[in-house]
Amino acid sequence: MNSTESSDPILKVKNLKVFFELEHYQNKGLREIFISSLSHPVQFFFKTKELFYALNDVSFELQKGSRLGVLGVNGSGKTTLCRCLSGMMTPQFGEIDTKAEIRAIFDSGTGVMPELTGRENAYLLARLFFPKSNDIETIVNEAIEFSELGHFIDVPFKKYSKGMQSRLMLSLISSKTTDILILDEVFDGADMFFKTKLASRMMRFIESAGATIFVSHSIEQIREVCNQLLVLNQGKVHFFGDIEEGIKNYINLKS
Amino acid sequence: MYFREELLQTRDLTVASIKSRYRKTWAGFIWVLLNPLMMFGVQSLVFRKFLKLDIPDYFLFLLGGLLPWIFLTTTVQMGTPAFVGHSLLLRSFKINPMVVLSAQVLDGFINFVASFILILLPLYLFSDRSMISLVLLPIAILPLLIGTLGMTITLSILNVFYRDLNFVMGFLFNLLFFLTPIFYPKQFVPPQYEWMIHLNPINYLIDPFRSVVYDNSFELFFFYFLKSLLVAFGFVLLAYFTWKRRRNEFYRIL
């Protein structure tokens, strides 16, 4: 057996930097911009742009079998990191080195067309979420059965409660395993009754994945799921390593 | 890399959005036909009877410009808020946002084809024009479709940052309508004002379609087609660079 292969990291993140220019358009419409260009022309045209670093020199490696929890206060760069890894955002500097298939989920209450039924939405979601899959029928049927939505499955999706919406979506996405799974605060929506049944399916899903990155505000969930911890602070890696030590670090950071 | 998959996604989303619109009522489809019919009716009355524009086969001439114009403007105005409208979906997992928008544009395109078949085609068949030139139609609408897609993508990305963009676009289209040779032929424009028409990109996207249904001249069509292809390509480049530059902020602000 080739020993180097099993110890090769499944994902290498090197010196990742993502920054944004804080521009005048923030939350403004064109009309407001037009008005401010007329009323304060000097400030408008000569305003220096501020740079905001969402990720600043983030590096870490992920081994196969790793279940990495990510903690950090709001705005520390957790979601930006996950969006870069998923390929949604492109970092201005740094490298993401992996051959693995990455699947990332950022919200669990998503429907595609709220006017259509849960079943129709399930098909669309499956098509969008598993683009390469040939057995969408099987995936959808299995997920619908697991979700226990009963006759509600043929009711328009917009009439679902938030809990029912996440039940359907989480059942669906957890039906196929992947190399690297990224879960960014997805357990917040599922209702309490279902949480136990869903939790065991999600745990199996997480364990079957090659590696997992798990973002949560709940230290309890992180303890339950993860075997490694990354603490982000103001876009930088504050801690990387053992869970309990990392949690102490995170609590100190907050206080 | 995912081209085939994204085509399938686009197809499914297009079908789903048509389904979701017409599930409750088919009346929406009547509006799709009523809108161009009413615009056509009023304009042909005003320009032919009131202003007495003397243009042979004015019906064909007017519809040849009006239908593509309506397709372009309604699609752009329906598509501009699309990214914001689908923000939850686009934020939830990785899908190509262009799939969502292509579906929106195709949806509008189907309306365009329907209005062509039900309104323009019968008039064309009653005129004494040759049927053969209609063979060029699928090629003629290609730049129109591509250009509309590029324009809609660009504006929909910008709309994430400037949420009142669609309001401004509605205003701009109202102005541009008069600077696009739709109810009047280009030849009517005095030479010193021609630059206004030349600067208007929509003009180029409409030309090939009208040329097929009205001019019946292959040389003219070919000339228009090449120009419109360039303009369409320009809009695609614009969309590409807008996306490349704004991509990260797009996801942050969405």
Image (tube, coloured by chain):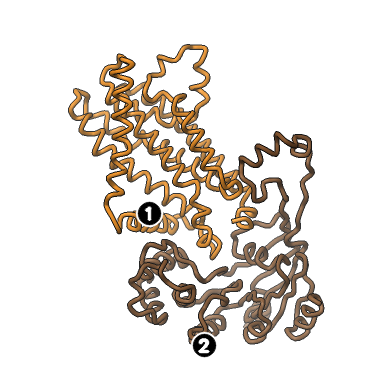
Q: SS class of the residue under badge 1? A: helix
What hue does chain B carry in this figure? orange
Query: Which colour is chain A painted?
Result: brown
Name the residue type under label 1: Thr
Examine the rendered structure and indicate whether residue A64 appears above or below residue B215: below
Residue B58 location, x and y as percent? Answer: 28, 21
Disc 1 target residue = B14
Residue appearing at x 33%, y 23% in the figure:
B218
Q: At 70% across and 68% down in the image, what residue appears?
A: A74
- The subunit letter for the residue under badge 1 reads B
Q: Could you say which is closer to the camera, residue A152 or residue B193?
A: A152
- Left or right, B42 with respect to A225, comes to left
Relative to the observer, which residue lies in front, B51 or B9?
B51
Residue A164 in picture, x, y percent from top left: 45, 76
Which label sits in the foreground, 2 or 1?
2
For the question of whether residue A103 can be seen, the reply is no
Decide which of A56, A25 is in the foreground and name it: A25
Q: Position of residue A186 (x, y in %)?
A: 57, 74
Q: Report x, y in % for residue A27.
A: 64, 51
Instruction: Identify the image quadrant of residue B127.
Output: top left
Identify the mark at residue A196; answer none if there is no mark. 2
Cα–Cα gap, marks 2 and 1: 37 Å
Q: Amino acid at mark 2?
A: Thr
Give the vertical position of A141 relative to B157 (above or below). Answer: below
* B55 sits to left or right of B251: left
